[in-house]
Image (cartoon, grey):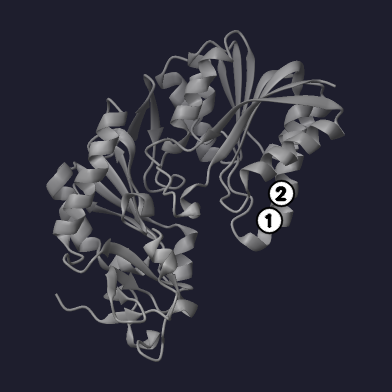
Amino acid sequence: MEYPALYLKRGEDARLRAGHLWVFSNEVDVARSPLADFEPGQACAIADHRGKPLGVGYVNPASLICARLVNRGIDHALDRSLFVHRFKVALALRERLFEEPWYRLVFGESDGLPGLTVDRFGDVLVAQATTAGMERLKGEIEAALAKVFKPRQLWWKNDASIRSLENLPEYADLALGEPIDAPLIVREAGLEFECNPVSGQKTGWFYDQRGNRDQLARLVKGKRVLDMFSYLGGWGLRAARDGASEVVCVDSSPAAVDAITRNAQRNGLQDRVRAVRADAFDFLRNLREQRERFDVVILDPPAFVKRRKDLAEGRIAYRRLNELGMQVLERDGILITFSCSHHLPRSMLLDGVQQAARHLDRQAQMLVSMQQGPDHPVHPAIAETEYLKGFILRVLPA
């Protein structure tokens, strides 16, 4: 195995030795290893300033994160064999956690495969490569997934906006298997949901919230529930199944609203679930003006802070959203609120909820703190792997 070396400046190996996997362009000794000499996604050996190899990774000279470490040491190439091993290690965890094969199988850096995500839907896999290195290794990844899982289908859902940071095109296509004119089904807690790996959000389903949705059973029986940013109805249908008397699911996408309706019918919950197409902020304002009230309000929005420079504006958006949510709650209501913005700290989200409560002369009691599920494990050395934070709060008059 002969990979070109990427040399780091003196002292710039400390973060990698502490467990992180990223190399930034200003950390590279470009006199010894000019970034312009590398092709996007090219495999390399990453070495410290003394020339001691740290491991094998890949380079993208056009990206701020110019290299990612995939394997410590230089004994293994970036090939099918390495991917087979990593997939088996990832599978061992998921099989301990879940009884059925519906879960996030690979979560990037946390599973030792930076830039790669794989979701499992029974015998269908949906993968996403967000870096030039993983894009270049697609053939090895496909071969390894075929060997370990023998999927009926493997889809590439490579349309994430983050790919633009690596100068990669956006596309979605079928890599393995035959196209079938039938919806992809995901199972969760005894319910079935139709999803679409090509046109759906992310890779089709939000597995990261599954464990948090398990909290609903003790909160919604006989209650009126509002599910904002509902997507395919994951929260709303779980609430209906767990005994809610009425559930209103709201999403701005007509395709999502149609899917919620179909999913409610598929699970025999159409008599208690109503899907509405609307902008979330406008819908909540209208409810407030009409003095509509719900016992439980669920706010699971998309990321309002996608870049660090958006933090100030996004922080205000989260506070306003939670204030509107509280304004349509009954006097002793439950607010379930989330942020999937990595750049928004957990404490800042909770502070925004508290500010909203005080502005309305309400008292908030934080009952449960939530995070992403265990099939999205957090790497202790990589803060970026912890992104989802949420709270269950009781909201009372002050």
Taking depth in this image into account, of 395 and 237 the one nearest to the observer is: 395
Q: Which mark identifies residue 315?
A: 2
Neighbours of disc 1 within 10 Å: few (<14), some (14-19), many (20+): some
On the rendered image, what quadrant is the N terminus found in? bottom left
Q: Amino acid at mark 1?
A: Leu
**Quarter where residue 152 is shown:** top left
Residue at 43% x, 35% y is 373
Q: Is residue 105 above or below residue 135?
A: above
Neighbours of disc 2 within 10 Å: few (<14), some (14-19), many (20+): some
Taking depth in this image into account, of 353 and 241 the one nearest to the observer is: 353
224 left or right of 127 in image = right
319 left or right of 177 in image = right
Q: Amino acid at mark 2?
A: Arg
Taking depth in this image into account, of 317 and 257 the one nearest to the observer is: 317
**Quarter where residue 54 is shown:** bottom left
203 left or right of 340 in image = left
Q: On the image, numbered disc 1 is attached to which residue?
A: 311
37 left or right of 296 in image = left
Q: Position of residue 71 (x, y in %)?
A: 26, 62
Residue at 23% x, 51% y is 86
Q: Is residue 276 above or below residue 196?
A: above
Q: Are marks 2 and 1 in contact (CB under 8 Å)?
A: yes
Q: Is residue 363 above or below residue 124?
A: above
Q: Secondary structure at mark 2?
A: helix
Q: Position of residue 372 (x, y in %)?
A: 47, 38
Gap in Å between the C-alphas at discs 2 and 1?
A: 6 Å
On the rendered image, what quadrant is the C terminus found in? top right
**Residue 275 seen anywhere in this rendered image of the structure:** yes
Q: Position of residue 285 (x, y in %)?
A: 78, 34
Q: Is residue 11 above or below residue 31?
A: above
